[in-house]
Image (cartoon, rainbow, N blue to C red):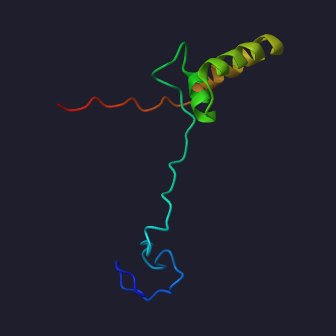
């Protein structure tokens, strides 16, 4: 079997070309998942978007995340408040969606 992209001779069991990386059998290759990024939310935020960003990153309900942060704030004696402020400063804002051109 030969690569349809660059012409390199391949083994029958190869899923990708060793030279150009072109898939030899696209029906067997799974698409690569986009990596998740921890970002502050622009939409759906209440204060700084930190809780909404963590909820999206951990695939949790944002209300549950806010309750957890609030409970940890009272239990820790205020340390979590400093962590929240640090996260607000350090976490990048998510890319705002561009309006559709009409």
User: How many numbered markers are drawn?
Assistant: 0
| Position of residue 100 in the picture relative to residue 87 (left or right) | left
Residue 77 appearing in the image: no
Q: Return the residue found at the far front.
A: 27
Q: Where 35 sits versus 51, above or below?
A: below
The N terminus: image quadrant: bottom left
Corner quadrant of residue 88:
top right
Instruction: Give the x, y percent position of residue 65.
Output: 66, 22
| Position of residue 88 in the picture relative to residue 7 (left or right) | right
| Position of residue 32 in the picture relative to residue 83 (left or right) | left
Q: Where 83 sits versus 38, above or below?
A: above
Q: Where 97 sits versus 30, above or below?
A: above
Instruction: Give the x, y percent position of residue 5.
Output: 34, 77
Q: Residue at x 72, y 19 (%)?
A: 68
Q: Residue at x 43, y 89 (%)?
A: 9
The C terminus: image quadrant: top left
Q: Residue at x 52, y 51 (%)?
A: 33
Instruction: Give the x, y percent position of residue 14.
Output: 52, 79
Residue 28 appearing in the image: yes
């Amino acid at each position: 079997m030969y690569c349809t992209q660059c012409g390199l001779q391949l083994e029958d069991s190869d899923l990708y070309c060793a030279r150009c990386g072109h898939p030899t059998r696209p029906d067997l290759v799974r698409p690569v998942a986009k990596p998740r990024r921890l970002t502050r939310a622009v939409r759906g935020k209440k204060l700084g978007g930190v809780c909404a960003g963590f909820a999206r990153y951990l695939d949790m309900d944002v209300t549950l995340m806010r309750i957890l942060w609030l409970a940890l704030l009272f239990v820790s004696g205020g340390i979590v408040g400093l962590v929240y402020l640090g996260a607000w400063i350090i976490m990048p804002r998510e890319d705002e969606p561009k309006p559709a051109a009409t």
